[in-house]
Image (cartoon, rainbow, N blue to C red):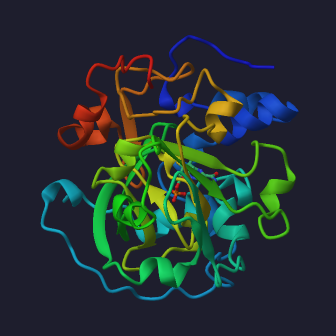
């Protein structure tokens, strides 16, 4: 029941992911929402989230200690998105499909204790408590642009550990060509999973060489504190040269494998969301242009950069590939 148009539309007219999914699965969205879409309401900040204070019942965050790498490729000096916007304007469908739902509905989500299962093509598989996973590593702050496939962007100071450093500890075998990630599946704790808006649990994946690139991190914090629940506590993926939906939240399982893993958005809408999902201003989404983006908190739009501005660090990973096909 796809309702699509190949005609280019202004990003103010983009129907956001949540409305698209709702429309496809339930045909519940009103005709006016099809025209305006909720992205238009949210792009200039989160006025909507002012109603009721989502901070009132949230579990307190902890301050983190971290290094600040000197490599300018890992720390953009662009203005940071405000903490408020970054924590009130979210996509986390496990807590609802509206941008303000995750902040409102995830406050009491318990993430302690937490453990991660690492399995598949590794010499040392196992379930590891989060503290044990993090213990041998120092934390780093990375200030990255985040470009959502919906044509908005933010600049966020993440705190985390290079994904490659963590994977190495589990001793990948020579057959480990891809990494697959899975979010917790627990509809009692994540009420959005009771609705079949996606094929739960949320799954994402990377090629092994992408996962080993130093830009890819597992984040445990942002703005100097442990992650708020709505941003993917206690552990999420951050891959800044890819569209934001690759940044899977609240990860409980990592599997190294020989075959390309199935990923949630690609399974739901294969024509719209690819496995690679590298930010590319030259490949439009079937329903809107990807040439420009709206920085949340600012007015106007700015050009979107190939690989979200990280081409020097990652373009070589895709040499010889047709990037139009591998969006
Ligand atoms: N991870 C899970 N488990 N569930 C989700 O719905 N949404 C993705 C990604 N990770 C999502 C997820 C999308 S579409 C985006 S744009 C980013 O998270 C948003 O991250 P943020 O809310 O921290 O800005």
Foreground of the two, 186 or 47: 186
Residue at 45% from the left image edge and 40% from the top image edge: 177
| Residue occupying the point 47% across, 57% down | 237
Q: Position of residue 41 (x, y in %)?
A: 58, 46
Write down the quadrant of residue 88 in the picture. bottom right
Q: Is residue 205 left or right of residue 82?
A: right
Q: Taking 161 as reference, is 74 left or right?
A: left
Image location (x, y in percent) of residue 169: 40, 67
In the picture, the quarter occupied by the C terminus is: top left
At 43% across and 55% down in the image, what residue appears? 172
Determine which quarter of the picture holds residue 186: bottom right
For residue 144, above or below residue 285: below
- Residue at left offset 22%, top offset 33%: 316
Q: Is residue 88 left or right of residue 189?
A: left
Q: In x, y percent, where is residue 13?
A: 57, 29
Query: Quadrant location of the N terminus?
Result: top right
- Vertical placement of residue 109 versus 230, above or below: below
Asked whether the viewer can see residue 89, the reply is yes
Q: Quadrant of residue 210?
A: top left
Residue 62 is situated, as x and y percent measured from the top left of the image, at: 47, 88
């Amino acid at each position: 029941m796809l309702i699509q148009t190949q005609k280019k539309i202004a990003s103010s007219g983009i129907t956001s992911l949540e409305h698209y999914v709702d429309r496809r699965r339930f045909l519940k969205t009103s005709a006016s929402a099809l025209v305006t879409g909720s992205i238009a309401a949210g792009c200039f900040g989160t006025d909507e989230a002012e109603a009721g204070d989502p901070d009132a019942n949230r579990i307190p965050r902890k301050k983190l200690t971290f290094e600040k790498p000197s490599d300018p490729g890992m720390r953009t000096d662009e203005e940071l998105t405000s903490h408020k916007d970054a924590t009130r304007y979210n996509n986390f469908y496990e807590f609802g499909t509206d941008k303000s739902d995750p902040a409102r509905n995830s406050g009491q989500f318990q993430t302690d204790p937490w453990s991660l299962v690492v399995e598949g093509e590794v010499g040392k598989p196992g379930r590891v408590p989060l503290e044990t996973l993090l213990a041998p590593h120092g934390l780093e702050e990375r200030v990255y642009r985040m470009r959502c496939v919906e044509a908005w962007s933010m600049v966020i100071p993440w705190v985390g550990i290079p994904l490659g450093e963590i994977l190495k500890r589990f001793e990948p075998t020579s057959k480990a060509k891809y990494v697959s990630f899975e979010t917790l599946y627990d509809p009692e704790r994540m009420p959005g999973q009771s609705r079949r808006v996606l094929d739960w649990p949320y799954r994402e994946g990377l090629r092994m060489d992408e996962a080993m690139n130093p830009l890819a991190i597992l984040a445990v914090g942002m703005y100097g504190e442990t992650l708020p629940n709505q941003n993917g506590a206690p552990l999420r993926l951050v891959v800044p040269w890819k569209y934001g939906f690759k940044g899977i939240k609240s990860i409980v399982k990592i599997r190294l494998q020989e075959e390309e893993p199935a990923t949630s958005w690609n399974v739901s809408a294969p024509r719209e969301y690819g496995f690679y999902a590298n930010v590319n201003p030259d490949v439009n989404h079937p329903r809107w242009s990807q040439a420009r983006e709206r920085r949340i908190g600012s007015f106007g739009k700015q050009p979107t950069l190939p690989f979200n501005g990280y081409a020097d660090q990652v373009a070589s990973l895709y040499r010889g590939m047709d990037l139009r096909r591998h969006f």
